[in-house]
């Protein structure tokens, strides 16, 4: 059975550095992958490459068993959704209209259908921002705008979601809500999620697998259950301690010298 997304010998370079060397990796339905690494390790570059927004320096990527580059753009957008780390709103529009733009890959005619509108309103409700539907998107706070961006991604209704720091602008309650929502989405048949996050403990409570980006292009891909303080410390460049409470594991930075 084909993976939702996979890579063979994927190599990424930037500014004369090898960020990722020969990544052989599979993302399958039901999985939630966390990409972990230091600043500048190549996490965002990896997600942009997997989304088809930049070319790899080596290797290949397949989406549902077909070369990523061979997918027509609209068909790819029905399979894969991508949330960047930042964006700029170039013009005024209502929040609901911003979400309806994400329905473009599914649109059969010129006008928004009842299903399009229902999908957008359901995504707003899932993020607790239904009350913002008529607001000008440029008047939102940073956290509100981030939740609207995630809601637009959900409205796109692709089975595979790639998210770059989706919880970065959110308070702790909305971070927990968002990560639980993404984990629940992975339980839908044929769906999966991959996200970059520095919210280590919240993310690893919900992720099933982790991709660690190490120095000099090295990497480790493994189930979250197999993570250790030693591995995470090497990945993040700072010693971490593992704490267990109520059957869960938490990772805390060790005190400095």
Image (cartoon, rainbow, N blue to C red):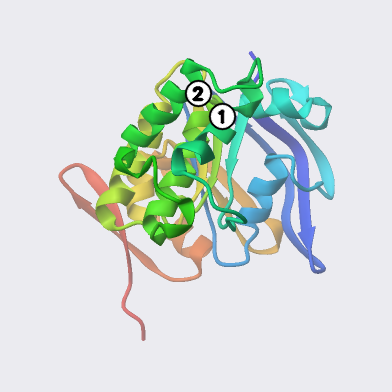
- Nearest the viewer among 207 and 162 is 162
Residue at image position (68%, 31%) is 6
Residue 175 percent across, percent down from the top left: 33, 50
What residue is disc 1 on?
A: 160
Residue 87 percent across, percent down from the top left: 59, 56
Q: Counting residues from the N terminus, which is met first, the one under dot 1 or under dot 2?
A: 1
Q: How many badges with numbers are in the image?
A: 2
> Image height check: is 77 above or below 149?
above
Is 196 situated left or right of 255 in this image? Answer: right
Would you call the spot at circle 2 few (<14 residues within 10 Å), some (14-19), or many (20 or more)? many
- Nearest the viewer among 116 and 207 is 116
What residue is disc 2 on?
A: 191
Would you call the spot at circle 1 few (<14 residues within 10 Å), some (14-19), or many (20 or more)? many
Is 240 situated left or right of 95 in this image? Answer: left
Considering the image in quadrants, where does the C terminus appear? bottom left
Res 57 label: none
Is 126 situated left or right of 30 in this image? Answer: left
User: Residue 223: in sight, yes or no?
Assistant: no
Residue 122 percent across, percent down from the top left: 37, 27
């Amino acid at each position: 059975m084909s993976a939702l997304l996979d890579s063979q010998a994927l190599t990424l370079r930037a500014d004369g550095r090898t960020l990722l060397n020969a990544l052989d990796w599979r993302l399958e339905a039901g999985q939630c992958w966390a990409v972990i690494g230091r600043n500048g390790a190549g996490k965002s570059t990896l997600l942009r490459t997997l989304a088809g927004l930049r070319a790899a320096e080596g290797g290949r990527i397949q989406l549902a068993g077909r070369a990523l580059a061979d997918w027509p753009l609209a068909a790819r957008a029905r399979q894969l959704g991508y949330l960047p780390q930042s964006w700029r709103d170039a013009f005024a529009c209502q929040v609901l209209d911003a979400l309806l733009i994400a329905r473009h890959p599914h649109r059969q005619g010129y006008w928004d259908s009842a299903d399009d509108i229902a999908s957008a309103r359901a995504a707003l409700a899932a993020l607790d921002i239904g009350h913002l539907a008529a607001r000008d998107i440029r008047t939102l706070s940073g956290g509100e705008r981030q939740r609207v961006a995630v809601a637009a991604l959900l409205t796109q209704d692709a089975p595979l979601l790639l998210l770059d720091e989706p919880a970065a602008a959110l308070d702790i309650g909305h971070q927990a809500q968002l990560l639980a929502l993404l984990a629940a989405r992975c339980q839908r048949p044929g769906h999966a999620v991959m996200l970059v996050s520095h919210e280590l403990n919240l993310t690893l409570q919900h992720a099933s697998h982790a991709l660690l980006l190490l120095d000099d292009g090295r990497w480790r891909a493994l189930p979250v259950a197999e993570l250790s303080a030693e591995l995470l410390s090497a990945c993040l460049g700072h010693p971490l301690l593992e704490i267990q409470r109520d059957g869960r594991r938490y990772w805390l930075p060790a005190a400095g010298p």
